[in-house]
Amino acid sequence: MSIKRSLKIVSYIVFIMGLSACGFALRGAVAFPFQSIYVGLPDSSALGGELKRNLRANGKTEVTTQATSADVILDVLGESRDKTILSLNSQGRVREFNLLYNLKFRLRDKAGREVLEPTTISLKRNLSFKENEVLAKEAEEALLYRDMQSELVQQIMRRLAVVKMDAPAKAD
């Protein structure tokens, strides 16, 4: 009995050590390669407000109100939300919609040089539709757009974190 128990204990210890050595770690605060940023979206914009909140949450990056006092400038070149019919039922009524959220932006430095070339992020969600649940489906649509907006902000944050501010000049 003693040997079986010892083997169990040793196997548990090996399992726990193996699990702890897998390298899993929570994602920490995002470190941006710049100290300040100007976001070319108004505070009244839901996307602009959420993006600025996420940038400020870092604690190390200042979101400025003037483009001239920022290290980098985030220009929004286009933002659109579209809703298209995805499928119809046998009576020809809408059964599903496709929700699209597109954002095109670029990042420039103080001198106006592009640090991040124009980038487009496109997100899609499907929304089923029932005529007798119109109000519920409108609320679900708003919720899906908010979810896409949050995902968009997270994608922008990840792209800003990997920007190379001092890219070396290309040698010929």
Image (cartoon, rainbow, N blue to C red):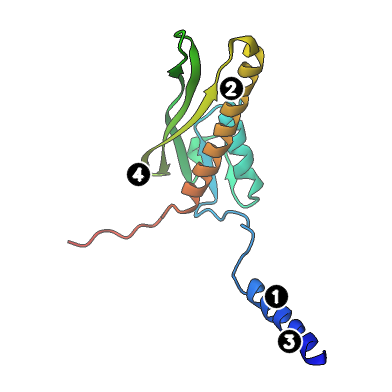
Q: Name the residue tied to disc 2.
A: 141
Q: Give the label on residue 159, or none.
A: none
Q: Is residue 128 above or below residue 168?
A: above
- Label 1 SS: helix
Residue displayed at 32% across by 60% down: 168
Farthest right residue? 1
x, y percentage for residue 68?
48, 38
Q: Name the residue tied to disc 1.
A: 16
- Label 2 SS: helix
The 10 Å Cα crowd at callout 2, few under 14, some 14 to 19, many 20 or more, is many
Q: Name the residue tied to disc 4.
A: 113
| Residue type, mark 3 in image | Leu
- Label 4 SS: loop
Q: Name the residue tied to disc 3.
A: 7
Residue displayed at 49% across by 32% down: 40
Q: Quadrant of the N terminus?
A: bottom right
